[in-house]
Amino acid sequence: MSNSAGLQGALAPLHALSRFDTPPRRLLSAWVMLVGIVTIVLIERKLPQQWRGSVDVGVVIALTWGTVAIVRECVRAVKCGSGRVDAEIGKRE
């Protein structure tokens, strides 16, 4: 294994999170999402206990919705032979 392949393997999690080797627009989007999620978590930690249950229900609904969407797209991609979403991996603007 070359040093380049080893480095790419070590940085794979950051690449999957769109933190490098991505177009500027996707990089900005990734950082905005990261800051937004951290902000929401910090705000949620300050909520009184009785409101945290409502937040948890919202999280469960969102995760269920996302899971259904991913499964639906996977089934469609297997049936049709290709996906609709361009991952923009390795492309430069």
Image (cartoon, helix red, strand yellow):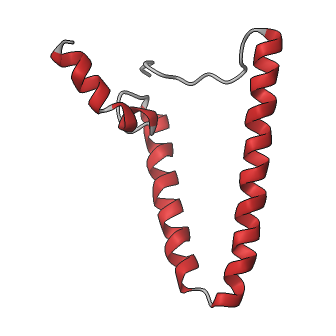
Count the marks. 0
Residue 72 location, x and y as percent? 81, 31
Residue situated furthest left in the rendering: 3
Q: Is residue 65 above or below residue 58?
A: above
Residue 43 location, x and y as percent? 54, 78
Residue drawn at x 71%, y 89% is: 50
Residue 66 location, x and y as percent? 73, 45
Q: Is residue 68 above or below residue 8?
A: below
Residue drawn at x 77%, y 15% is: 78
Left or right, 41 with respect to 11, comes to right
Quarter-of-image position of residue 87: top right
Q: Is residue 63 above or below residue 85?
A: below
Left or right, 26 with respect to 83, comes to left
Residue drawn at x 72%, y 79% is: 53
Residue 85 location, x and y as percent? 67, 24
Residue situated furthest front in the rendering: 1
Left or right, 29 with respect to 57, comes to left
Left or right, 76 with respect to 30, comes to right
In depth, the one of 58 and 90 nearer the eye is: 58
Q: Is residue 64 above or below residue 39?
A: above
Residue drawn at x 83%, y 13% is: 79
